Image (cartoon, rainbow, N blue to C red):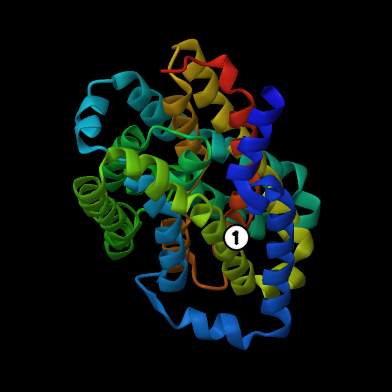
Amino acid sequence: MSEIKDLTVKDEMGVFGRYLSVWVALCIVVGVAIGRFLPMIPETLSRFEYANVSIPVAILIWLMIYPMMLKVDFSSIVNATKKPKGLTVTCVTNWLIKPFTMYIIAAFFLKVLFAPWIGESLANEYLAGAVLLGAAPCTAMVFVWSHLTKGDPAYTVVQVAVNDLILLVLFAPIVAFLLGVTDVTVPYDTLFLSVALFVVIPLFFGYISRRIVIKNKGMEYFENVFLKKFDQTTIIGLLLTLIIIFSFQGEIILSNPAHILLIAIPLTIQTFLIFTVAYVWSRVWKLPHDIAAPAAMIGASNFFELAVAVAISLFGLTSGATLATVVGVLVEVPVMLTLVKIANKTKGWFKTA
């Protein structure tokens, strides 16, 4: 009986889900190759950008998020606000722990351990980029990670919304404090556009689609037929996003491999640390897995559009700080997929509801 169940699960995952690590590696290689040998493709795509947000990437992220938003029942959003423990884990980890551990870890590696290979000036710039990433918890991709860990979609929406509100107030002061600068200008057009594109619009269309399908076909059809049509949509969108992101940065990767690796090391360690803090705390508090996993993913993942935009405005397009935020983009997906796998394998540690 268990063998039949395992086969059913594998069939639901599809070829992309079963061999996701292989597909991710292939997409990274394809993306870098496109950036190196077919630069006209990323150059053309980069023209479709507004407020530092890539529209092609935004469309693909929307494609990834939409299936999760279909599962959001608005009455459950109200109920989510009555469960403060998950929100507490998210907010404390993201705003009282993450920015400061990012600074400490990045400073140790970049200014001490890797100083002989980087130099003081460049180390300071890389550190600035790391801080910008550390002060910007995720808005968009966390919906993807939550979907892949079967997170509570309504609660994830609330977690992201609360973080976005805090981001408006605390991002600039935290960055100014850690970097010792006074002229941090938050690009609100980037912030508001990202929230609209990655939260409001897919949530609206998911809500409308859900109501129309349930009204005309019933809940059973919606859950057992309609939702299953989107089983592979999130993963396919994720793989296409990887190709585009790595094609944008293909030349940078090939021309700065050593420094990119050095920057990636502290960023990766920080990501695992923050995930562990939130995930273990959630287990100690006996939160269900569908709340614990997204709570840990929000802090581990980064709002890289905002970090890149601020790095460019503060330090310039060709600065080390901007390069460090770009490395954050490159590191994020492979590392977060590893954390998704860890979260799924440890689901038995948590309450089921």
The image shows residue 156, relative to residue 318, as above or below, that is above
Q: Is residue 195 left or right of residue 292?
A: left
Q: Front-most of 15 and 8?
A: 8
Q: In which quarter of the image is the C terminus?
A: top left
Inspect this view and state whether residue 223 appears: yes
The residue at the far bottom in this view is 40
Within the image, what quadrant is residue 287 found in?
Answer: top left
- Horizontal side of 48 relative to 321 (left or right) equals left
Residue located 49% across and 71% down the image: 316
Q: In which quarter of the image is residue 85?
A: top left
In the picture of the structure, the residue carrying the numbered disc 1 is 239
In the depicted structure, whether residue 305 falls above or below residue 227? below
Relative placement, left or right, of 90 versus 215 is right
When the figure is inspected, residue 164 is found, relative to residue 208, above or below; the finding is above
Q: Which amino acid does label 1 sit on?
A: Leu
312 or 348: nearer the viewer:
348
Frontmost residue, 156 versus 163: 156
- Badge 1 marks a residue whose secondary structure is helix
Instruction: Pinpoint residue 190: horizontal percent, then vertical percent.
Output: 33, 63
At 36% from the left and 30% from the top, the residue drawn is 91
Q: Quadrant of the N terminus?
A: top right
Answer few, some or many: residues within 10 Å of disc 1's Cα (few below 14, many 20 plus, some between 14 and 19): many
Q: Is residue 261 left or right of residue 199?
A: right
Residue at image position (58%, 17%) is 348
Which percent across, then down, holds residue 177?
Answer: 40, 42
| Residue 296, x across and y down, in percent | 49, 31
Can residue 71 be seen at all in this image of the molecule? no
